Amino acid sequence: MECREEKQENIFRSKQHDIDIPNHLPIHTYCFQNLSRHLSRPAIINGATGEIFSHREVELTARRVAAGFHKIGIRQGHVIMLLLHNSPDFVFAFLATSFIGATTTTANPLYTAEEINFQANISKPKLILTQASYVHKVEDYALKNSGTVIVCVDPPPPPYLHFSELKKSDETSMPEVKIHSDDTAVLPFSSGTTGLPKAVMLSHKNIVTCISVQVDGENPTIHVDAGDLTLCVLPLFHVYSMISIMLNGLRVGSGILIMQKYEINELMGLIQKYKVSIAPFVPPILVAVAKSEVAGAKYDLSSVRRVVCGAAAMDRTLQESVREKLPNATIGQGYGMTEAGVLAMCLGFAKKPYKFKYGSCGSVIRNARMKIVDPLTGTSLQRNQTGEIWITGDQVMKGYYNDPEATKKTIDKEGWLHTGDVGYVDGDDELFIVDRLKELIKCKGFHVAPAELEALLLAHPAISDAAVVPRKDEATGEVPVAFVVRAKGSNISDQEIKQYVSKQVVSYKRIQGVYFVNDIPKAPSGKTLRKLLRARI
């Protein structure tokens, strides 16, 4: 009966068999389940300093930090915000939060104070871990929310705590905490299919499932050996890096080479120095590698056996260009979203690899089901028919925190997550992304919500109406540009608009072009017709 129903509904499954997943375990227990096999293996290498931490040291330090959190009043269910660049301390704090049964929320440290406070006012962190240079961005929140503790990973201004003190805590002093698999473990932010950023509730079950479908089983989807070294240049505050690099590496006992800040020559130098074997990138980094005149000449990149592209689509031309610089690497991509982790993955990365096509995102991930749905009729479509991608499985989020309406719009009553992305599954069960229903702009692998920028523009007295859409950009994928209707009597210039926005947002959200128009095209419902605006660029 079930098979007939799935055939009728045109439900797609992975080419690989489903596996048993121990998703009743909390994240830290699952990741350190096989710790005894690789106690002394390098777990983290700090690219900036050369400092190396073994898997034994990572686990012990995380437990000590958890005891330190408890000592200063952090309890199960509390939220800890990590406002950090990539660093070993991010890893320690994330795992410690899991040990204590608290919830990690993350924010880009380059965000403005307004952007960070927007997230903090939703997630309500009891502790904010950051650098001394970013304390000014969160002091106002801490003052307005008594009991919030600020801790710095470097020497802090008084009266704030130094993270090193927490790392010295007695790991045996932390009381035992009973964690349920449905407890919220991570609260990252996503704009979802549209609108302002929302807090995504990811449970321990969600995250363990997402890790397991990638690296567990006899033929893991992403084959990572304990002897592999994965480059971590993508930001750990993003779930792509957090799960597919940090947590995957801890689970299999491999090493992670952490870069705090991206710089192309330093990146290639670290690959050569440490013999990096796995390189997860986003398209802008791949473009830089492909265009580099010294890649493969000055820098030996032959150790890289796998390049995993995520966060935005990689076209065939780019894939072939990168292959010239990384001749020993399998180059492919995966597809995912904050709300459900990895949705599809190139099976050329499997232990027993499958053939795959240029441009495909691979097969739907194991233990999940996917269908392609006509956005107008709701009918599930057959192979080679284009529609919205829906997915269901244990990796799908619990919902948006304190936002039931947005949750209902994204996850239906049957548990299908409506991704907002448009694609098709071909005759070989490979997924291709061709467009997206959602209005997000993808710049340098980050999501930019048009609604957020439009709200800023509409707040300016010299602007009567505005809309923000993406413009293709070779270096970054897309950049936001604005269509602006000047207020009556206004002569505001494009430069004034760009400067006004740039003061309030992180660099990749800045408006890169302004088009002055007499009106913004809208549907009878009032919805902005961005498709018409994109056609004008």
Image (cartoon, rainbow, N blue to C red):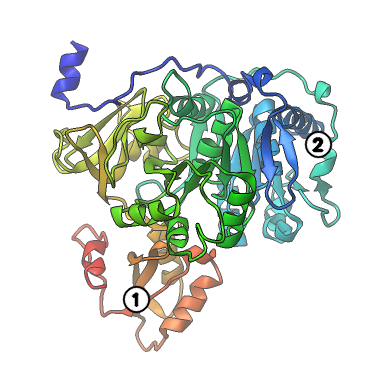
What percent of the width, then of the height, locates residue 224?
51, 31
Packing grade of label 2 (10 A; few <14, some 14-19, many >=20) is many
**Residue most extreme to the top:** 1
Instruction: Determine which quarter of the picture holds residue 117.
Output: bottom right
Left or right of residue 343, residue 216 in this image:
right
Q: Name the residue under label 2.
A: 167
Separation (CA) of disc 1 from disc 2? 51 Å
Q: Is residue 129 above or below residue 472?
A: above
What percent of the width, then of the height, locates residue 206?
47, 28
Q: Name the residue under label 1.
A: 484
What percent of the width, then of the height, locates residue 502?
52, 72
Left or right of residue 251, residue 329 in this image:
left
Which amino acid type corresponds to the residue marked 1 in the rendered image? Val
Which amino acid type corresponds to the residue marked 2 in the rendered image? Lys
**Residue most extreme to the front:** 297
Q: Is mark 2 on a helix, strand or loop?
A: helix
Q: Which residue is drawn at 25% across and 75% down?
A: 519
Packing grade of label 1 (10 A; few <14, some 14-19, many >=20) is many
Left or right of residue 333, residue 169 in this image:
right
